[in-house]
Image: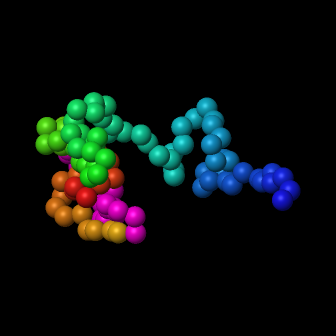
Amino acid sequence: MGAAEPTEPIPNPNGRAAGQRSGEPEQEGSVIQQDNKLTSAANFSGADSVTAPDFWPKARLRSQIALGYVPDPGYTKDAPKPFVTRTIRGTRRLIGALQAAP
């Protein structure tokens, strides 16, 4: 096997190469990081179980990570396991990808 050939960067919709920065913020096709929550491991009581780990947060933290809006109305399913999807029920959304316990 030979060395990998260098490849050209793939342009994104705004015409700049992926990962390229400019002095002005991107207006279209950009990702905005928001609604983050910093917490401690104590809010995930089952995470240290080797036989049945549980990373679903305690009720106290779930009340703190509730969003007051639906960030993406097109996001109607989550994936609690690989190759498994389920419909998100209700209008309440939480910070993070999973919207209910797996």
Q: Is residue 83 above or below residue 38?
A: below
Q: Residue at x 33, y 56 (%)?
A: 72
Q: Is residue 37 above or below residue 17?
A: above
The image position of residue 54, as x and y in percent, is 25, 49
56 vs 89, nearest the viewer: 56
The image position of residue 73, as x and y in percent, is 30, 60
The image position of residue 10, as x and y in percent, is 69, 55
Residue range highlighted in magenta: 65-83
| Residue 97 appears in view | yes
Tell me: 33 left or right of 16.
Answer: left
41 vs 71, nearest the viewer: 41
Q: Is residue 68 above or below residue 1?
A: above
The image position of residue 41, as x and y in percent, is 28, 33
71 vs 28, nearest the viewer: 71
Q: Residue at x 33, y 37 (%)?
A: 36
Q: Quadrant of residue 48?
A: top left
Q: Is residue 20 above or below residue 6?
A: above
Colour style of the rendered protein structure: rainbow
Residue lying furthest right in this view?
A: 2
> Mainly helix, strand or loop, the magenta region?
loop
Tell me: 50 left or right of 26.
Answer: left
97 vs 71, nearest the viewer: 97
Q: Quadrant of residue 88?
A: bottom left
| Residue 65 appears in view | no
Q: Residue at x 43, y 42 (%)?
A: 32
Is residue 23 inside the magenta stretch?
no
Is residue 70 inside the magenta stretch?
yes
Q: Residue at x 25, y 58 (%)?
A: 102
Q: Quadrant of residue 78?
A: bottom left
The image quadrant where one finds the N terminus is: bottom right
The count of marks equals 0
